[in-house]
Amino acid sequence: MNAAPTGERGDRPRVLVKEKIGDSGVALLREHCDVDLGVDWDDEELERRIGDYDGILIRSATKLTGALIERAQRLRVIGRAGVGVDNVDVEAATRRGIVVANAPQSNVVTAAEHTMALLLALARNVPQAHSSLTEGRWERSRFSGVELYEKTLGVLGFGRIGQLVCQRARGFGMRVIAYDPYVGAERFRELGAERAAAPDEVYAAADFITVHLPKTPETEGWLDAEAFSKMRDGVRILNVARGGLIDDEALRQALDSGKVGGAALDVFPSEPITDYPLFEGYPNVVVTPHLGASTAEATDRAGFQAAEQVVAALTGGVVSTAVNVPAVALEDLELLGPFLPLCRRLGRLAAGLAEGPSVDRVEAEFLGRVAERDVRPLTVAVLMGVLGGHTEETVNEVNAPGLAEERGIEVSEIKRTAARDFTDLVRVRVLSGDRGDRVVGTVLGQRNRPHLLQAWGQRFNLQLEDHVAVFRYSDVPGMIGRVGTIFGGHGINIESAAVGHSPEEDGDDGRAVMVLTTSDPVPPEVVEEIVASDGFEAGRAVSL
């Protein structure tokens, strides 16, 4: 994003550094701005004086609420020296035209190194041996450990941090097997990691398992009793990502039974916490108080990166990590704007229907009037749909292309000014190798409602809602009724449905695809129940 430079006043912009950051960040700000340090200000003083500043730089303690932002009449940029922006009312800032930027890559090296520190501590019983010796006991034989050399490390989540952990583990001579369907196959090959088609492959092979997944409703409790039951006896578990990715009670039971030989945890379901069930009575558990991002270098890096973004926003530079950048130029907003939610939904649906083990390529094709404009924001919207909820950080208009690149995902954008049957069409394909089905959609009506026109090779016309289920089946009477009966038995209400047919070929029954929108998400077990019944071949449920 190119930010507007300071106005015609001719004076330097004023910036408030509300929380302590590294000296390098403050020095950079002072090269371009007049800087005040308000690290000792209380809430009342901040509320009284925030209107004096063009920019503010914070960490995690300061809460920039909508009411506070309304008092900041001059404010044009908020810099967050860290990864998230949970303490900023981004929507309120966006309404006011204030750029919000963070430092998303500031702690990736630190988190990867802390993972390795815990991996080594877990393998060699370092904390336990230290405590024993400092308490006056020489118990050399008790703390004999295992080597990392030629052991298998399973990595769940192969984004920035997972890839850095892989590189470091390979340096110890470890075999790495990783699961992440949103990383291209070529990236696994580049890093020397084996690509697992499913988490079960990781569970079956790994001596150590480290979790680097984002925290979403789908990933909460990812490592549960069922997952532990599929692992090798004595496996060691690490979590330096997010609290809640591991089912606490299931982990405790697996430790008690010996199924899990040890665990190293840096994050917990609620923090701060001092009464966690595994803090006492488990000598094979290593814990640290959320130190994954806590190094002097990471703190300094975060402050400097955030300062760079503040300077860019106030001097007309490129704000590369903004989280609320308008994606559509004003002159294109009227035409392209309605297609943004359609493209996000088609991207998410295409990814949800994809049948391969990885995302290697995303193709976005635009046909009709829309292709006469700069459609790059629409391609980014497709990527946001494909990657949303599957990366360590929140995907937005700024970082989506970079996240795709670092995951080895090739992106293709095609424009054709003619479209059959409709004024405008959007086609999206998510490919794994050379496998990938196309989803097609458009917007219809005065309110530009998104409509799905094609999926799994069949055509229909259905208004897209938040929850979609798709089934492929033999085209015989009664199939829709069977789905409705099963949905009804599980309390799921069908809002709309459409069917696409294939003609009979060579005397065989034809095939059909039904698409349904529902009032609530369709659980995986319901999809499995339907697909297991006679005549059904495949099914997917996707929340858009």
Image (tube, rainbow, N blue to C red):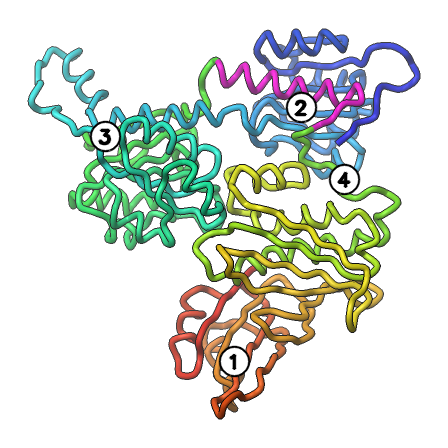
**Amino acid tagged 3:** Leu
Mark 4, other Cα within 10 Å: few <14 / some 14–19 / many ≥20: some
Crowdedness of circle 1 by 10 Å Cα count: few (<14), some, many (20+)?
some
Q: Real-space Cα distance between discs 2 and 4?
A: 17 Å
Give the mark nearer the N terminus: 2 vs 4: 2
Q: For mark 4, give the secondary structure.
A: loop
Could you tell which of marks 4 and 3 lies nearer the N-terminus? 3
Disc 1 on helix, strand or loop? Answer: helix
Q: Nearer the viewer, residue 150 or 110?
A: 150
Up-down relation of residue 11 to residue 363 (above or below): above
Of mark 1 and mark 2, the one earlier in the sequence is 2
Disc sitting over residue 79 in the figure: 2
Task: Residue 235 in the image: state x and y as whole percent.
Answer: 22, 41
Residue at image mark 4: 326
Residue 78: image quadrant is: top right
**Secondary structure at numbered mark 3:** loop
Q: Is residue 66 visible?
A: yes
The residue identified by callout 1 is 484
Q: Residue at x 50, y 90 (%)?
A: 506
Residue 357 placement (x, y as % from top left): 43, 55
Dot placed on the residue nearer the N-terminal end, 2 or 3: 2
Residue 310 magenta: yes
Q: Mark 3 vs mark 1: give the one in front.
A: 3
Q: Which residue is mark 3?
A: 148
Amino acid at dot 4: Pro
Tell me which label, 3 or 1, sits earlier in the chain: 3
State the residue at coordinates (22%, 34%): 150
| Viewer-proximal residue among 441 and 30 | 441
